Amino acid sequence: MKRNPRKVKWTKAYRKLAGKELAEDATFEMERRRNRPEKYDRELVHKTVKAMDKIEKIRGARQDRFYEQRMSRAKAQQAAADRKQLEQEIHLVKAPGALAKEKEEKLKVAVEDEQEEMQE
């Protein structure tokens, strides 16, 4: 079954399009295909292999930074969603007896405030 790679979530095309991976980076230029093969030179190969190691470290650091930035935004959103859910479902967290006591205390405070106002 043929599928559009931009719509299938596990493909590189989808991840880049959705902003989950680096799409534009100068290190990708090194992987570009070349039309002409280079003449073999031992020194050039040695330098190229060293450069590949450096580039891989740089790319890894950039990917890690990119991931951390994405997750920091997601962490803030998740915290807000958790807070909202806790406010909506607080009755599941607190015992019914504790909730009843809180209501009684609020009523006592309200009654005391009213009595103080009447005395003045």
Image (cartoon, rainbow, N blue to C red):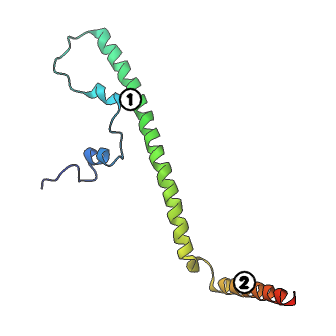
Which residue is depicted at the point 35% across and 46% down? 19
Which residue is depicted at the point 55% across and 66% down? 83
Q: Quadrant of the N terminus?
A: bottom left
Which residue is depicted at the point 63% across and 82% down? 95
Residue occupied by mark 1: 56
> Secondary structure beneath disc 1?
helix
Crowding at dot 2, Cα within 10 Å, few <14 / some 14-19 / many 20+, comes out as: few
Q: Residue furthest front?
A: 120
Counting from the top left corner in percent of width and height, residue 7 is at 23, 53
* Left or right of residue 27: residue 11: left
Query: Which corner quadrant of the image does residue 86 belong to?
Result: bottom right
Counting from the top left corner in percent of width and height, residue 64 is at 45, 39
Q: Quadrant of the C terminus?
A: bottom right
Seen in the picture, residue 79 relative to 12 is either above or below; the reply is: below
Residue type for callout 1: Glu
> Secondary structure beneath disc 2?
helix
Give residue 106's mark.
2
